Image: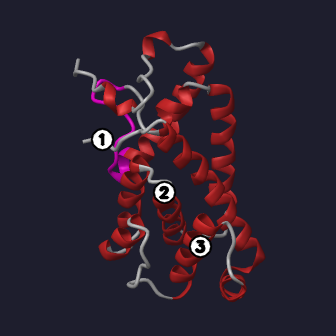
Amino acid sequence: MAAVNEKLGGRLPLVDPAGLTPEQQDLAASVRATQLPWAAGAGFEITSPDGRLIGPFNAFLHHPEIASRFLAFSAAESRYTTLGERIREIVILAVGRVWAAEYELYAHSVLAANAGIDRAAIQALAHGEAPTSLHGDELVAAELAQQLSKNHRIDEALYRVAEAAFGRRGLFDIVALMGQYLTVSALLSLFEVPAPG
């Protein structure tokens, strides 16, 4: 069996699968059934070399009762959103940057590249800069997510442009996605969860 790098948990110990409570077992099984194939297909890691969950998933195991419901919200957000994959990844990267969530930026930089977002835009978003290679609705989404995350408000001109681009339901979807990744990013930052490697 591969050696465990305990630093992958940040301030949290990596949860040993042999010692899981029934609630943790249910959550771990759900993550392995849904998130593991998704991450493996995308090309980023959610397990350590010995198979322990890392990233937010290790943190989730420390409170499975809330985490399982949070993941249900995440699944509903993903299923019912009006946002396309590229817009979603732009928003997620903007939120991850504000929170300096290293693991989030690692995973979603991979997902953004898979969605066809160019490297310059990914790097700009990951550094909190204006992604000048983006245009149209994508640039509006980036500006909205960056401004709302940093200032907790957006100016009227940006609101009007964003409402025209996404409609009210789309704006709700952006905020729901931001809230989801604000929670994940804050969790990762609080526990100083690193990117693997």
Q: Provide the secondary structure element on which disc 1 rests.
A: loop
- Of mark 2 and mark 1, the one earlier in the sequence is 2
Look at the image and tell me in which quarter the N terminus lies.
top left
Return the residue nearer the eye: 71 or 8.
8
The mark lying in front, picked from 3 and 2, is: 3
| Residue located at (40% from left, 55% from top) | 105
Q: Which residues are magenta?
A: 40-51
Numbered tag placed on residue 63 in the rendering: none
Outermost right residue: 168
| Residue located at (67% from left, 76% from top) | 154
The mark lying in front, picked from 1 and 3, is: 3
Q: Position of residue 89 (x, y in %)?
A: 49, 64
Residue to which mark 3 is pinned: 147
Residue to which mark 2 is pinned: 96
Look at the image and tell me in which quarter the C terminus lies.
top left
In this view, 163 is above or below 145? below
Distance between mark 2 and mark 1 Cα atoms: 16 Å
Cβ atoms at labels 2 and 1 below 8 Å apart: no
- Residue 153: which quarter of the image? bottom right
Q: Position of residue 108 (x, y in %)?
A: 42, 57
Outermost front residue: 151
Amino acid type indicated by mark 2: Gly
Q: Position of residue 46 (x, y in %)?
A: 39, 38
Amino acid type indicated by mark 3: Gln
Total label count?
3
| Residue located at (30% from left, 24% from top) | 50
Residue to which mark 1 is pinned: 196
User: Would residue 44 be counted in the magenta stretch?
Assistant: yes
